[in-house]
Amino acid sequence: MRKTARPVVWEGVEVDYERLYFAYRADGQDWCWLPGPLDDSILSDEAGPPGNPNFTGAFVGMCCQDVAGTRRPADFDYFEYQERSYRATIP
């Protein structure tokens, strides 16, 4: 049972090698794909000095920043990752 009557919004991302495709949908509605693709070839976890071997790959996950300072929570019920072996065919 939900504690509040806040709307449910689903978020999705297709990671296709160096391309990212983002989408969202209201509960029970069709997916709405955002304009893209976005370049993810520059995403990495490199944190050390240049020249040192420190790259372990790009990551996909959930996060939220309250850049407006509203002190309101963003609740995520779950996160699911599914690897696939085909290239995306996003509209």
Image (tube, rainbow, N blue to C red):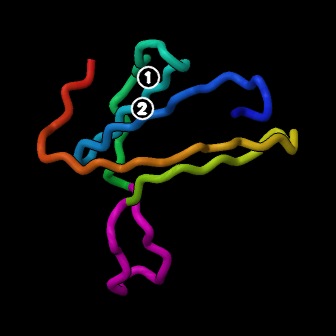
Cα–Cα span, label 2 and label 1:
6 Å
Residue 20: name its quadrant: top left
What residue would you read off at disc 2? Answer: 22
Residue 34 numbered tag: 1
Residue 54 spot, x, y in % from top left: 37, 81
The crowd level at tag 1 (other Cα within 10 Å; few <14, some 14-19, many 20+) is few
Nearest the camera: 76 or 46? Answer: 76
The amino acid type found where label 1 is placed reads Leu
The image quadrant where one finds the N terminus is top right
Is 69 left or right of 8, judged from the image as shown? Answer: right
The amino acid type found where label 2 is placed reads Phe
Residue at horizontal 65%, vertical 47%? Answer: 64
Residue 80 numbered tag: none
The region drawn magenta spans 43-58
Residue at horizontal 43%, vertical 34%? Answer: 12
Nearest the camera: 90 or 85? Answer: 85
How many numbered circles does the render carry?
2
Residue 26 spot, x, y in % from top left: 55, 18
Picture layout, residue 53 above or below residue 87: below
Find the residue positioned furthest to the right: 70
The image quadrant where one finds the C terminus is top left
